[in-house]
Image: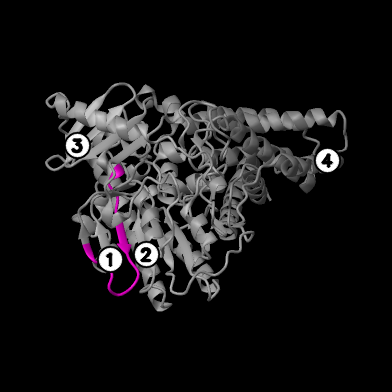
Amino acid sequence: MAGATWWLVETAANWAFGGVIPVRAATTMLGLDLAFGVAAGGTLGMLLALIGEGASAPAFALGLAGAYGMIRMYEPPGVRAEALFLVLAIVSVALAVRLAGHERRGWLAFAHLTLVATVATALGKTGVGEMQSTYFGKTEPTGIALPLLLAGLPLAGVAVDRLLGLLVRRHGMRFAAEVAAAVLAVFLCGRPLPIAPLEDSSVTAPAPRAGMPDIVLVVLDTTRADHLSTYGYERETSPNLTAFARDASNFARASSPAQWTVPGHASLFTGMYPTRHGAHYVGGWNSGPVIYGRKRVFPLPPERVTLAEILRDSGYATAAFVANFANLYRGFGMAQGFQRYEDQPGLLLRPVPHAVRFVQRFVPSFFKKPFRSAQEINAAALAWLDKTPADRPAFVFLNYLEPHHWLAPPPFDRWSRDLPNARRLAQRGLFTHAIPAGLNEEERAFVAANYDGQLAAMDVALGELLDALRARGRYEGALVIVTADHGELLGEHDQVGHGGRMMYEGLLHIPMVVKFPGTARPRGEVREPVQLVDVLPSVLEILGLPVPPDVQGEPLQRVRHGIVAEEHINPEFVSYYGQVYNRALRVLYEGPYKLIATSRGERMLFDLASDRAEENDLASREPARVREMEQRLEAEMSAMVPTVASVKAAR
């Protein structure tokens, strides 16, 4: 009964706080809670018998509340925090039993006190942690606060129940009233995450002319080109992408105009740079609308015209299937033009159940991946594709997210599992924007090996998608585009992750492979620089459709514009990780040279032909080149402000 109560409370709390638990995961969690309940109950029963307490309802219920807390507290190899909690829990349980009253007997009293203690622990602890959030869930207290809360909250719950007893003396009636109040509070105050796909059938354009190709756009979220074997990396991370590139045009010098998901995708969909399309970090606290519980981002404005809108209005069936729910969720504006938009997480725990945290101490990857896998994205996209009307071509967008979560699953952990101290490193949580001393060589090797494994896992799914298109006869005549929104730093320059404090090549150099429709299509490697903003005009040129005003990109095979990138200030990073993040960034490429300029007056110049790792800053040695490139960068950026107030109104 205690295990079932833990599961019920945690599942309800997840629903109320915006978590998502699929049926299979919920069943697994229930099994864990029942197993822990049985084990803890048996152990506690023997201990209570030894001390002569017997199986009284208050002692048994509140002793199990202590066991529930210990499941969360346990964190090998240390024992100090657990010992502190044990001492605090014994004192708290003794006080709570006295407060609850020894006269309470039977299953009803046990169920009542178990529920009171569990609710107090789960909601009290989560409530304290709600002041901050991670990318995928809510944080919980750490340090000495955690054992104090885990030991003290059940006592607080019993105290509140005792106060209510002054008004409702009969235990059964009080229990029923508290359950009813809890259920009512969950449904009235809960904020469940909407996960039903967005459906938009309001626009019904006439069918396009015959022969219009299907368009398949695949974004390998968080994928840097130099860790793909397609671009010469020593590990075989992308054999399927390599095979696809032999049948297509491989743009070897593609780059993103941004270093994180929202502006990168917005540039892909609009053909505009971030300052023009407007979807980017807000720069300061409380500057933007509340999206996904935070105010850190300006979404893509509704007046911007997206590729999906153009294709939808031209008679295409349009759909998107995204794994990156955290930054492509519907509130960020990327759903514009898609008649079906699936953006739900695969598993989102808010808060993380105690039993799940316990298992994660031994299996670090257990229930850690919150997003849908690339195979799940494939299945959803292909199911939709099979249902599209025969008289309409399809535009389908797929977003894979495997490299974003760096711990590779079997069998793709083959490069990481045999590294020294792999199990210990897996527990370290090395994915962080705060590494003041940097990662050592062992840690960097571990991070890179896991990243490479995730790339390999994603590549398998890409190959499965392409095979499925061939089997359906929808490959040869289609326009298939495989690219990325940005890359990832893996410890170089003392940075891990993306959206960080400097725009190095690990973040900006991305893959881009395009299979044009038809058998006489161009194939081979293309060395001219291109960017994500060039995808939209390329697609429209192939289809013979006009390019909207304010588009800054050009067709991929005729790119002449400057190659630039930009990053606005993320106030969360500044708050969490310090002033090193408090600067806007701009980048200009010119031949082999790359200039990075910041809003704090910093200038960095690299010759990428001889220094791909960007370890040799030439700014102090070539001030004339820095000035010339800075002037050109300023000219490029001055043209970023949109000249048309409402493009959609003009259309």
Alpha carbon separation for disc pair 2 and 4? 59 Å
Give the residues drawn in magenta, as a range. Answer: 508-524
Under tag 1, what secondary structure? loop
Identify the residue under disc 3. Answer: 614
Write the residue at 40% across / 27% down.
577
Which residue lies at the image location 57% right of the left edge and 34% below the top edge?
A: 289
Determine which of the numbered discs, if any, sits on residue 177 in the image. Answer: 4
Q: CA distance from mark 2 to mark 3?
A: 33 Å
First in sequence: mark 2 or mark 3? 2
Q: Residues within 10 Å of mark 1 (few under 14, many from 20)?
A: many
Residue linked to disc 2? 480
Marks 2 and 1, the one that precedes in the sequence: 1
* Residue type highlighted by circle 1: Ala
**Residue type at the position of mark 3:** Glu
Give the spatial CA distance, label 2 vs label 1: 9 Å
Mark found first going from the N terminus, 1 or 3? 1
Quadrant hosting residue 148: top right
